[in-house]
Amino acid sequence: MKLENEKKSNMFVCAIRGILSALKTEKNVKIDFAIAILVIICGFCFRISCIEWIVCILCIALVLFAELINTGIETVVDLYTREKNELAKKAKDISAGAVFILAINVAVVGLIIFLPKLIDQAQILLNR
């Protein structure tokens, strides 16, 4: 039982270490985390609904997940070869493309949620 608990705690330590490593070394991960914090702050400021919170949290999780997977793929490819290799380039480009597609879709979702609230707030300020 003790060994099983040690394995579980070690699993969490490794996961946190991986996230922190990506945060330290990957510019896009830093940007994604910063945007996630901004979305959370905007969510509180605009008092978004429960459903909107769920959508925002899922979007944040998906983008961070995709970015971490992309970083993992790029790291493994770099471990395999540092030389110019078309298959290595293809693997990196495809994983980056997956993150890009997700980011565009999440940005659209963010606009759907926050743009009407921004417009309402601007109209309130203009009518003062």
Image: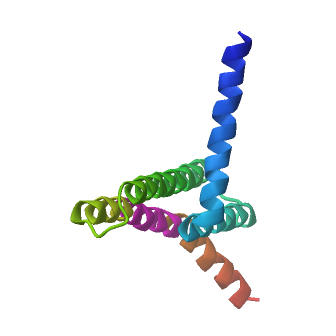
When the figure is inspected, residue 73 is found, relative to residue 26, above or below; the finding is above
**Main secondary structure along the magenta-highlighted residues:** helix
Q: Visible in this render: residue 39?
A: no
Q: Nearer the viewer, residue 106 or 64?
A: 64
Q: How is the image coloured?
A: rainbow
Image height check: is 128 above or below 95?
below
Residue positioned 70% across, 81% down in the render: 124
Residue 72 lies, in percent from the top left, at 47, 52
Which residue, as the protein is rendered here, is positioned at the far top?
Answer: 1
Q: Residue at x 67, y 45 (%)?
A: 16
> Residue at 42% across / 52% down in the picture?
76
Question: Residue 96: horizontal and vertical position, in percent?
Answer: 38, 64
Q: What's drawn in magenta, residue-wise?
A: 98-111
Q: Position of residue 102 (x, y in %)?
A: 41, 60
Q: In screen coordinates, is 12 left or right of 111?
A: right
18 displayed left or right of 46: left
Q: Nearer the viewer, residue 26 or 107?
A: 26
Q: Quadrant of the N terminus?
A: top right
Q: Position of residue 56 (x, y in %)?
A: 57, 55
- The question of residue 104 being in magenta is answered with yes
Total number of numbered labels? 0
Foreground of the two, 90 or 31: 90
Q: Is residue 57 visible?
A: yes
- Horizontally, residue 108 falls left or right of residue 98, namely right
Residue at 54 percent of width and 64 percent of height: 113
- When asked about the image quadrant of residue 81, the answer is bottom left
